[in-house]
Every structure is written in structure tokens, then in C-alpha cells.
Image: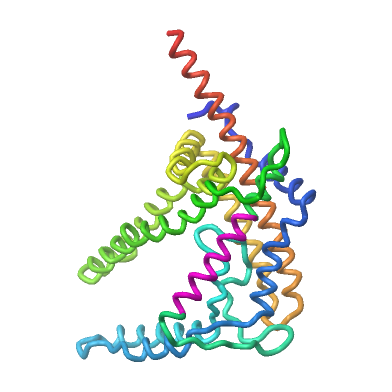
Amino acid sequence: MLPFEKQPKIFAAFRAGYETASKHLYLILFPILLDLFLLFGFRITIFELMQDVIQRFVLPPSATADLVASWEVLKSQSLEFFRYFSLTAFLRSFPVGIPSLLSVASFERNPLGEYQFIHLREPGTIVLVILAASLIGLFFAYLLFRLTARATTIQSGPPEPILESRSLVSWLLIPIVSIIFAFLVVLPAMLMVSLIGALLPIFTSIGYFFLTVAIISLLLPVFFTPHLIILEKLTLPQALAASFRTVRITNAKSTNFLFLAILVSYLTNMLWRIPSEDSWMLLIGIFGHALISIVILAASFHYITDARKNVREFTEIQMSETHLA
């Protein structure tokens, strides 16, 4: 654990993030342009396909009345969501992507009126659209992170090219590893909790609570992996290890920084989403969300840069003392 005086400064990082965003306002164009497209652009829906799939699912005759009622509510909510959900939302790629206020919005109208809908039914076409949108989102997110890293660090020589093959390959591996993790760890764990919950209903809530805590505990230490891929040009395994070690050594400070960043983002997003879907006030929300998101992103780069610097100095001192001893 780093000594207190060597710990990275949380509020200094946020202040530096604000200064970076105010000096490099072009960075907010990434989330603004994405949300403007999601608000005014065409929408690609899969409602007809999902309606067929959901309607074909029939509960067994032994299902209780409560289970049937719960299923009817879930079916109604799912159909209402997919009625206006657009596959263009995958432009906000996960787990890394351009911040977006409207990526999960299921709007029927926008301030200009009705949307132009493109309805897809073929599974193959749907998969291709999802892959294409995700790859486009990942690429532009890579550009955003590269430009933010350039804005938050002192350049000692000529500026590096925006595209760098090694970091780009590592960047594209992030969603692949995330999907593998979800299928090998998260989904089996959820299935196990559900199976045990079917026998012991009281275990369901407790099981999902501890599963959520476990997943957060696993993901928090590797939160800065994308930052280190960009800043230090590390491979994905190297960035994972470096992020894990840095967060563990700065455990309390890093946890507080991430908690504060998520809290600020969540609370302000509630504010930006107050206007109705056909209100021009949404434009103010889009701008405000973009500014806050870039401030937080820049602050995260300042924080991890400070943390890595302090960890290196602390490690060198420890090695020096060990060598002298």
C-alpha cells in the first residue's frame, strides 16, 4: 500500500480534468455527435423478430398463477422496449466506448417528429449490423481515448500519430475478452444462483447480491486497462496486470475516485434526461452530458497518470532499500 502522502489526489484529478476539457473542447464533439445521431438519425429495429420469439415461448401447464402473472408483465415490458429500441445503440460500444446519454433510449418520436424505422427480421443481418455498429463505435472510442491522452500528457517531442497498430489491436481485444468473461464466469454464476433460487427462493436475492459484489470486486482493479493501453502502449495482458497492481496499491483512493466518477455521471444523467423525447431541451442535456463525461474521462487519465508515477517511485525506493539491506 502506498503511503498516504504518495497516494494520487482525487480532487486534483477532477480539477485537471475540467481544465483539460475547457482547453480542448473539440473532445466533447464525440459524445455530442453520437447522441445527435441517436436522436435524429434513422432507427434499426428488431421488434417483429423479438415479438415472434417471445410469443413462441410458452410456460408449462404446471406454472403457478404468480409465475404466469410475472411472465405476462415481463413479456409486455420486453415488447414495449423492443418496439422502439434501435440497433444503432451499439455505436456506444461496450465495455469501452464513447459516452452517450441516449444509447439505451427507446424513443418513438424526436423534436422533428417521427423516426424513419428500418425493420430487420433475418438473424444473420442483425448480427452483421450489431458487429458493424460495435466496430465503428470501438474505433471512434479509440480515437477519443487517444486524443484525450494527448490532451492530458505533456508532449516532449513531436506528436505521435493518432493511429498506432499495437494499441489498436489491444483495444479491439477488450470486448472479445469481456464477452469470454461473461460467458465463462458471469452467465454460469447467474444460472447457478437461479437454479438454487428455484429450490430456495430466499437465496435468490442474497445470491445475486453477493454475485454483484464479486463481479464489482473483479472489475474495479482492471478499470484502467484501456487507459494504460493508450498511455503506455501495453498489450492487453500487460495493461490488465498494470491496472490491477496500481489499483490494489492505491486501493481506497482508486475505489473512491471511481465511486465519485460513477455517482457524478449517474446523478447528472438523471438531470439531462428530464426533458421528454420530443423536446428541444434534450439538446441542452446532450451538451451537458458530453461536457461532464469528457471532464470525467480526462480526470481518469490524470488520476491514473499520477497513480502510475507514484507507484513507480514507491517501487524503486523499495527495491533500493532491499538492495542496500
Tell which of 59 and 53 is nearer to you. 53
Q: Relative to 40, is 17 above or below?
A: above
User: Magenta stretch mostly in which secondary structure?
Assistant: helix
Residue 92, image x, y percentages:
57, 66
From the viewer's perspective, tell me whether residue 54 is left or right of residue 149.
left
Instruction: Between residue 130 and residue 304, name the one nearer to us.
Output: 130
The quadrant of the image that shows the C terminus is top left
Q: Residue at x 63, y 61 (%)?
A: 267
Q: Is residue 280 left or right of residue 305?
A: right
Task: In the displayed orientation, state which residue is furthest to the right.
Answer: 23
Q: Which is nearer the eye, 325 or 156? A: 156
Compared across the picture, whether 22 is left or right of 229 comes to right
User: Where is residue 177 shown, x and y percent of the image?
Assistant: 41, 55
State which region is magenta.
126-143
Q: From the viewer's perspective, is residue 181 above or below residue 72?
A: above
Residue at image x 52%, y 44%?
255
Q: Can you tell which quarter of the image residue 293 is in?
A: bottom right
Quadrant of the rendered image containing residue 230: top right
Q: Position of residue 258 (x, y in %)?
A: 55, 48
